[in-house]
Amino acid sequence: MDVKKISDDEIKLNLSKLTSWEIKEGKLHKLFKFKTFNQALSFMVGTGMVCEKMNHHPEWSNVYGNVDVKLVTHRVAGLTELDFKLAENMDKIAGEINLRKD
Amino acid sequence: MDVKKISDDEIKLNLSKLTSWEIKEGKLHKLFKFKTFNQALSFMVGTGMVCEKMNHHPEWSNVYGNVDVKLVTHRVAGLTELDFKLAENMDKIAGEINLRKD
Amino acid sequence: MDVKKISDDEIKLNLSKLTSWEIKEGKLHKLFKFKTFNQALSFMVGTGMVCEKMNHHPEWSNVYGNVDVKLVTHRVAGLTELDFKLAENMDKIAGEINLRKD
Amino acid sequence: MDVKKISDDEIKLNLSKLTSWEIKEGKLHKLFKFKTFNQALSFMVGTGMVCEKMNHHPEWSNVYGNVDVKLVTHRVAGLTELDFKLAENMDKIAGEINLRKD
C-alpha cells in the first residue's frame, strides 16, 4: 500500500467518494453515532482488527454511543491512501451496526 | 428475570417466535454464519456484553465466520426464559452484522 | 450502588486508595499506557463488559497503546462511588495486560 | 511465513518449546482456563487481532471462563509453522490475563 503523502487534489477526490468525512486540522475526521455503548465498542473491535491487519491505527475517542475518529499518517505528517482505505473500511463496518435497534 | 425451568409447551411457543433456533439435546441451538472471522468475533463481543449484563452465558464455538451457539440454564438443568431472552438478543445483534459485505 | 455526589473529603480519601488517578476539571482521570494497540483494545473490551454490567460508562480516547480515561457521573454532574468503583475495576484489568511483552 | 506441512520430528521439537499444548486428532490443542467470562472473551479479542494479522484462525469453543483451542492449517491438511506461531502468541496473551483476580 502506498504511504506517500497525497496532494490536496487527491484528498478532495478521495473525500468526494466518502460520506460525512471531513478534513480538520490536517486529519481525516468523522463522528460515528451509534445507539448504544455496546454498538460503539463492537465497532471499535471490528475496526480494530482491520487496523491491526493494515498496521494503521486511528486516534479515536468514545463516549457512550459516539466514536469520534481522526485519521492521519504520522510518519509522513499528512494524509495517505492508508487513511482513506481505513476510512472506507470503517464506513463498511459501521454501516450495518448503525441500524441495530437494541 | 424468571429462572424457573419452562414447560415443553412454553418451549414450543417461544421457539415459534424465533428464527432458525432449534432444540438439540435439551439445549437451544443455532448456527450463525457470518462472512468473515472479523464479523464473527464482533458478534461475540457485542453478544458477550449482553451476556455479562444478563449474567447468562452461552456454550459456543467459532471457526472462521461460523459461530455455533448452545444455550441452557445449568442451574435448573433445562431451558428458562433467560435462554430465550439471550437468543432474541443474539438474533438482534447478528441481524445487521450478517449483511456486511466486507 | 450509591449514586449520590460525594464530598471533596470523600474524593480525597477514595483517591488515596488508587494509583495514578487524579482529578482534572471535576473528572477522575488516568492515562493507561500499554505497549501495543492490541493490549489497549483488549483492555477496552474487558473494561467495557464491566461498564455494561455497572451501567456506567467512561469518556475515553485511544491512540495506539494509550487509553486516556475520564470518569464522571453525568446525572449528578459530579463524582460518585460508581466512578471510583469503575476506576478500581479498570486498574485490576489493566494490571496484568500492562505486563505483556508482545 | 512457511506454510509447508511439517514433519513429525519438527512437531515434537516445536511441542517441546510450548507449555500444555498437545496433538489431538492431528490438531494442536490446548484448553485455556480463565477465571471469568470477561477474561476469556478479552483473550479471544486479543488473540483474534493476532489471527487477523497472521491470516490464520483457530477452531475454538468457549464456556464461561474456558477457551478450548484447536489449531490446524486446513490448506495443507496438517500442522505448519503458522499453528505453532499462533500457539506461542496465544500463550503470551493468556499469560497475564490468567493472573487476573477479578
Image: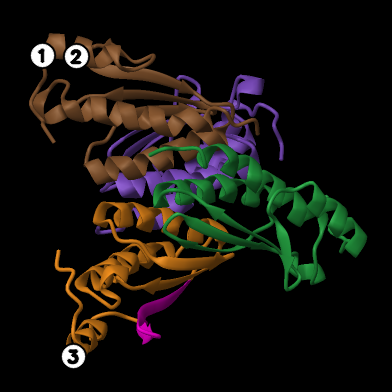
Chain colours: A green, B brown, C orange, D purple
Q: Amino acid at mark 2?
A: Ile
In the depicted view, which residue is nearer to us: B49 or B37? Answer: B49
Asked whether residue D89 appears in the rendered view, the answer is no
For the residues labelled 3 and 1, the Cα–Cα distance comes to 55 Å
Q: For mark 1, give the secondary structure.
A: loop
> Chain for mark 3?
C
Q: Residue at x 55, y 44 (%)?
A: A46
Q: Position of residue A21 (x, y in %)?
A: 70, 56
Provide the residue designation for mark 2: B11
Neighbour tally class for label 1: few under 14, some 14-19, many 20 plus, Cα within 10 Å:
few
Magenta residues, start to end: C20-32
Q: Indicate the chain on which mark 2 is placed.
A: B
Q: CA distance from mark 3 to mark 2?
A: 55 Å
Residues marked 3 and 2, same chain: no
Where is residue C84 shown, x and y percent of the image? Answer: 25, 73
Main SS of residues in magenta: strand
Residue occupying image coordinates x 12% and y 22% = B77
Chain under callout 1: B
Q: Is residue B77 above or below residue D22?
A: above
Q: How many marks?
A: 3
Q: Which residue in the structure is indicated by mark 3?
A: C9
| Vertical side of A76 occupied by D73: above or below | above
Residue A70 placement, left or right of D12 = right
Are discs 2 and 1 less than 8 Å apart at CB? yes
- At which x and y percent is residue D96? 39, 58
Residue D3 is left or right of residue B45, and the answer is right
Q: Which residue is mark 1?
A: B7
Badge 3 marks a residue whose secondary structure is helix
Q: Is residue A58 positioned above or below C3 on the image?
A: above
Residue D11 lies in the magenta-colored region: no
The image shows residue C12 at horizontal and vertical percentages of 23, 89
Which quarter shows the C terminus of chain C?
Answer: bottom right
